[in-house]
Amino acid sequence: SQQGEEDPQALSIQEGENATMNCSYKTSINNLQWYRQNSGRGLVHLILIRSNEREKHSGRLRVTLDTSKKSSSLLITASRAADTASYFCATARVIYNQGGKLIFGQGTELSVKP
Amino acid sequence: DAGVIQSPRHEVTEMGQEVTLRCKPISGHNSLFWYRQTMMRGLELLIYFNNNVPIDDSGMPEDRFSAKMPNASFSTLKIQPSEPRDSAVYFCASTGGETQYFGPGTRLLVL
């Protein structure tokens, strides 16, 4: 079953506005990652936040993590039409000496109108 | 680096036929993942390998699906026999650390 649940499922905003997407998960994690998928393409990694971190920034991206609530949010500031894509959160559980796997949420479909 | 390479990019086949999807991970990566993406079920992890060894195949839908990784630079996902409900985009991803790098996917249509 899916570990992450994302909210909203779809978001439509105007260029220049901020976009916020939320993700909730169920079990303990090592880290949480956000990925982006343009239509017809593979997923691309955006940012990773570890379980002992609360906030992280990368360019126009800001990610928060609340492990007590098992939730995360991705904020894209000053959105551009090129940000139009689907955004997925993924929770990671690392298994010693066996790598680890990601469990992806259903994604948020973001549409930024020029 | 060429990134993760998948072939074919598109596959159209008839029900009952065998389908083989191929993946070449990024050189030096030690974990490889096969995912399936559909509108209804989203992105599902089918199986992953670590150092060429299958670690978790709990996502493989049924015995019609099999995956192999004979060496560090090649993996296959086979469906035999294929069914219309197998129609989806199949992604391969690899990692040498914590973040995964995805291939462009194989779009499979089973008629």
Image (cartoon, coloured by chain):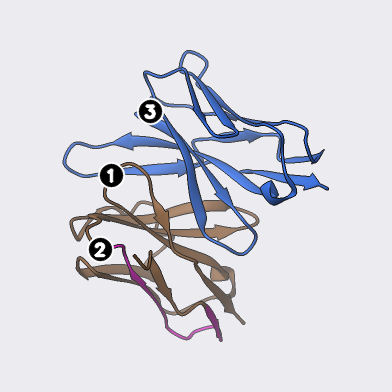
Chain colours: A blue, B brown
Q: Report whether residue B28 is seen.
A: yes
- Please name whichever residue, A62 or B110, is drawn nearer the observer in this view of the structure: A62
Residue B22 vertical position relative to residue A101 in the rendered view, above or below: below
Label 3: which secondary element: loop
Q: Position of residue A81 (x, y in %)?
A: 74, 49
The residue beneath circle 1 is B97
- What amino acid is at disc 2? Ser
- Please name whichever residue, A93 or A111, is drawn nearer the observer in this view of the structure: A111
Q: Which residues are magenta?
A: B10-27
Label 1: which secondary element: loop
How far apart, in angstroms, are the residues tagged by discs 1 and 2? 13 Å
Seen at 19% across and 61% down, the residue is: B52
> Is-magenta flag for residue B13?
yes
Residue A1 vertical position relative to residue B106 in the rendered view, above or below: above
How far apart, in angstroms, are the residues tagged by discs 1 and 3? 16 Å
Q: Tell whether A32 sits left or right of A9.
A: left
Task: Count neighbours of disc 1 (C-alpha within 10 A) and say few if under 14, some if 14 to 19, many if 20 or more.
Answer: few
- Please name whichever residue, B14 or B106, is drawn nearer the observer in this view of the structure: B106
- What amino acid is at disc 3? Ile
Seen at 51% across and 40% down, the residue is: A2
Task: Count neighbours of disc 3 (C-alpha within 10 A) and say few if under 14, some if 14 to 19, many if 20 or more.
Answer: some
Mark 2 or 3: in front is 2
The residue beneath circle 2 is B27
How far apart, in angstroms, are the residues tagged by discs 2 and 3? 27 Å
Query: Counting residues from the N terminus, which is met first, the one under dot 1 or under dot 2?
Result: 2
Task: Count neighbours of disc 2 (C-alpha within 10 A) and say few if under 14, some if 14 to 19, many if 20 or more.
Answer: some
